[in-house]
Image (cartoon, rainbow, N blue to C red):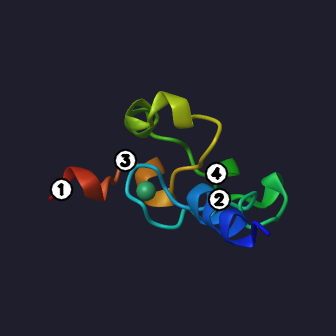
Amino acid sequence: MNSNETLQRLSWTASCPLCGQPNQCAIALGKSAESCWCMTTPMSLLALALMPEQERGQRCICPACAQGINPASHP
Ligand SMILES: [Zn+2]
């Protein structure tokens, strides 16, 4: 019985590592990668630089952070 674990894992992959908001990633939502917003939105180099190295390829960032709007950097 690890449904709780699965749920936690799902919300982890579905949240932005930079701001903690839902990343709206199509893959995390069980949809095809081609339907993800990241296919049409250019990634900010700043956002990529802020991404923790161990989380690259594990989690997606959210559309706001991808555009360089990082709420965490504006306390
Ligand atoms: Zn974000």
- First along the sequence among labels 2 and 4: 2
In-front residue for pair 53/69: 53
Callout 1: 10 Å neighbours few (<14), some, many (20+)?
A: few
Tell me the SS state at disc 4.
helix
Circles 3 and 1, Cβ within 8 Å, touching? The answer is no
Amino acid type, residue under disc 3 in the picture? Gly
Quickly name the residue at label 3: 68
Res 15 label = none
Q: Quadrant where the C terminus lies?
A: bottom left
Amino acid type, residue under disc 4 in the picture? Cys
* Real-space Cα separation, disc 4 to disc 1, in angstroms: 23 Å
Res 74 label = 1
Quick check: 24 above or below 70? below
Q: Quadrant of residue 64?
A: bottom left
Callout 4: 10 Å neighbours few (<14), some, many (20+)?
A: some
Quick check: 56 above or below 20? above
* Real-space Cα separation, disc 3 to disc 4, in angstroms: 13 Å
Quickly name the residue at label 2: 9
* Real-space Cα separation, disc 2 to disc 1, in angstroms: 28 Å
Tag in front: 2 or 4: 2
Tell me the SS state at disc 3.
loop
Task: Name the residue: 18% across, 56% down.
Answer: 74
